[in-house]
Every structure is written in structure tokens, then in C-alpha cells.
Image (cartoon, helix red, strand yellow):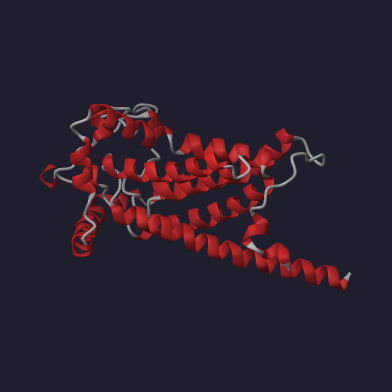
Amino acid sequence: MATTHFTINTAIPPRHHPSASSARRVASGLAPLLALYAIYSLVRWFVSDRGPVAGGLHARSILDLERWLRIDWELGIQRAVLPYSWLIFAANWYYVYGFLPVVIGCAVLGAWKAPLAFAWWRRVFAISLTIALIGFAVYPLTPPRLLPAAYGYIDTLLHFGPRYYGDATGSSLFNLYGSIPSTVNVYAAMPSMHVAWSVIAAALFWAVARRRRWATVIAIVHPSLMALAVIATANHYVIDVVAGLTVLLASICLARLWTRRLARQTAATVSRA
């Protein structure tokens, strides 16, 4: 059936949806995502105790693999950016405020203005989140910024701000500045979903903007800048980004299979009626 094709699932819907109010549609669309992300955060925290030991071992393996592949670009990129304070501040702020606020904002816009595209990418997001959780649980990884000083990386968020993950003691917004246990797992670096979910946000924005040329440019530039930001700030390795995009691609394929199965079930039900 035609409705099983990817292009149909991301098609731009009509502007008017008289069956439900916009507010109700947005709330009902986002509620499962928020619940799923809460579970995701808790699971990441529950497996964080394996990070300090296994994370360092895995980090050395990642660096060895990148050297073998000749893609160990993290230190070079950061050193190229460090002499320019405005670039470091831009990378830091983009890493912090260009991720979740943009993902949430684009999700709200998508649920409101492009519900068909939103429904598709919500499914992809849910699958990718599940796969990412498996990665965080079985492969804790110390990010470059937390490696010993001998490796040469600088925690730019700590030194230049904003201190997203807190000060040197770990006190941050995530633990109400030391009042409660933190739910952040700093060893959940593999895969990097910053770039993958920025692609989803960009796709939703592109659908809401009705695929205009300027929206296409923004949709390409945003994930690209996020990839640069996560590496320049020493929060991820190049392989983390590649792994995140691989997870996204696998999630798209699984979502297409899921959609086709639902379409076949619907067609079978209609034919029996």
C-alpha cells in the first residue's frame, strides 16, 4: 500500500485539523516522549556505577581504533578552536542550548503543524532511544573531557561555562547544586545522540517549514554545527557521532518495517470487515 512508503509518512499534512485542538494534539503527542525520556534518564543513572573503571578502558580502546582509522581528530579540532574564545563560548552554548531546547521546540512545532511527520519521527526517536540505552548500559565510555590531563583535552564547559555538568565537585542543576543525587551519567557517551537527535529536530523543522530552501539549509547546518560542538567541547569522540548516526539510520529502517507491518494489519482488518 502507498501509505507504507517513507515519503508518505513524512508528507506535509493539511494546515487545518478540526478533529482535535492544537493544544490537545501537542500535549498528547509529547506526553509519551516525555515519559520515555524520563525512563531513559533513570536507566542511564542506574548503570552509571560501571563508568569510572570500564569507561576509561573503553576510552583507550576508542582512541586506539580512531588512530588506526585515522579519524582521531578530537584533539586537533579542540586545539584549533581554543585560541578563539568566542568560538569556544559558541561551541559551549550550542552544545547546551542547541540540543534539548531545540529538540523539544521542534517536537512541539511538529506536533502542532506537521502531525504526520511528527508521528513518524516520534517512532524513530523511541526506537533510537531504546538502542542508545543498550549502548550506554553495555559500553560505558569516559568522554575526552574527563580523561587524565596527559591526554591534552580541556573540559571547556567547566573552564569557560556554562557549567552544564556542574563545577569541579559535580554540583549542578541536575542535582539541585548538591542537594540531591545527580541523575546524570557522564559516562553515557557511546553512542552520541546529540547529533542524531539534532537530525530528527532538523527534519521536523523542515517539515513544519514546508520544505522551503532556507529551511533545508538550516536542517543541514544545525546537525553539522552540533557535531562540531560535541567534539570541540571534548564531550564526544568522532566515533561516538558516527555510532549515533548509525543508530539513527537503523532506527529509521526499523520504523519503516514497523509502519509496513501496521499497514498490512490494517489492510487485513479492513478486508475482513
Q: Residue at x 27, y 27 (%)?
A: 86
Q: Quadrant of the N terminus?
A: bottom right
Q: Residue at x 36, y 60 (%)?
A: 138
Q: Quadrant of the C terminus?
A: bottom right
- The image position of residue 10, as x and y in percent, is 64, 53
Seen from the viewer's position, the closer of residues 166 and 202 is 202
The answer to whether 106 is drawn above or below residue 236 in the figure is above
Position of residue 140 in the picture relative to residue 35 (left or right): left
- The image position of residue 4, as x and y in percent, is 68, 64
Residue 24 seen in render: yes
Position of residue 271 in the picture relative to residue 204 (left or right): right
Position of residue 78 in the picture relative to residue 35 (left or right): left
Task: Residue lying at the far left in this picture: please name it.
Answer: 150
Task: Residue lying at the far front in this picture: please name it.
Answer: 213
- The image position of residue 31, as x and y in percent, is 63, 42
Residue 190 seen in render: no
- The image position of residue 174, as x and y in percent, is 40, 33
The answer to whether 134 is drawn above or below residue 85 in the figure is below
Task: Residue lying at the far right in this picture: please name it.
Answer: 273
When asked about the image quadrant of residue 59, the answer is: bottom left
Q: Residue at x 60, y 45 (%)?
A: 211
Number of dots carrying numbers: 0
Seen from the viewer's position, the closer of residues 2 and 30 is 2
Seen from the viewer's position, the closer of residues 115 and 179 is 115
The answer to whether 267 is drawn above or below residue 119 in the figure is below
